[in-house]
Amino acid sequence: METGNDLRINGLGSSSGGKFDFVQINGKGDITGDLECRELQINGLARLTGNVKANTIRVSGKSDFRGDISGNNMIIDGMSDVGGNVKVETVENRGMLRIAEDCGSESFSSQGGFTVGGLLNAEKIGISVYAQCKAREIGGKEIDVRLGGGSGIRKFIGSLFPGLPLNPVLITDTIEGDNVYLENTTAKVVRGQDVKIGPGCHIDTVEYKNSYEKNSDARIIVNESRKI
């Protein structure tokens, strides 16, 4: 199973972790210690109980990370649960991503559903809302949230991920950024330099420094807006 600097699990297998170049799990694999590698590729079912550090993490199957994740790129096309924090340069989520604590990156993009138990923080955040997305707080420079695709695409995503809540909405307590554009968002406070509120939003309070614009869509509810 371990060949040179590579670790490959095909079928059923386990490893105590360590340092590798390439790690691939195609069947059902357990890694019980900390893992450090250049690339981690999960195509089957994986459980990793330690911390993971990798240049690139690709999940096409289902993964359960019990510790923290750090590295450069995290690409989710399947379902992934993280019990700790995520700190990587880029996150690309096209499936279902659940992070129990904080997520910090330079760039965060999502075209599926996600849950972040703490702070979602990135320089650039782009969210296409195809399913329910949740974070306790969201912060960044550029924050762009839009309703993704049509109902047919959302149903197709639901067929791929049966446990995914399909109601297309972003739910959070606080959003804070420089340039903020929101659709289909429910939040208590939105704070920014320039703020635009698009269709399908329910916002308690908008605080802005430079400009504020609200779409005329009847589905928008903003209880209070003020310049700070």
Image (tube, rainbow, N blue to C red):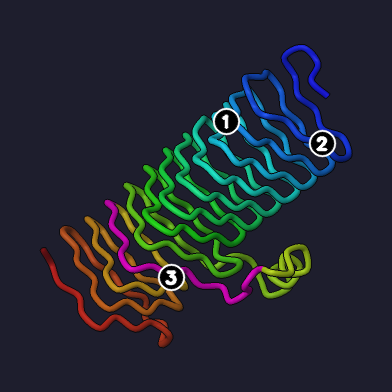
Disc nearer the start of the sequence (3/2): 2
* Residue 31 versus residue 149 in the image, above or below: above
Q: Residue at the bottom extreme?
A: 218
Was residue 165 drawn as part of the magenta stretch in this picture? yes
Q: Quadrant of residue 199?
A: bottom left
Residue at 64%, 49% in the rendered image: 64
Task: Give neighbour class at mark 3: few <14, some 14-19, many 20+ (Cα, 10 Å).
Answer: some
* Residue 114 versus residue 64 in the image, above or below: below
Q: Residue at the right extreme?
A: 11
Residue 206 image position (x, y, % from top left) = 24, 71
Residue at 68%, 45% in the rendered image: 47
Q: Amino acid at mark 1?
A: Asp
Find disc 3 in the rendering and name its residue. 171
Residue 85 image position (x, y, % from top left) = 45, 45
Q: Amino acid at mark 2?
A: Gly
Instruction: Check whether the beta carbons of the residues at disc 1 and disc 2 lie within 8 A of each other.
Output: no
Find disc 1 in the rendering and name its residue. 34
Left or right of 12 on screen, residue 136? left
Q: Amino acid at mark 3?
A: Ile
Q: Secondary structure at mark 2?
A: strand
Q: Which residues are magenta?
A: 164-178
Comparing 163 with 111, the one in front is: 163
Find disc 2 in the rendering and name its residue. 13
Task: Give neighbour class at mark 1: few <14, some 14-19, many 20+ (Cα, 10 Å).
Answer: some
Disc nearer the start of the sequence (1/2): 2
Residue 121 image position (x, y, % from top left) = 37, 48
Q: Main secondary structure of the magenta part?
A: strand
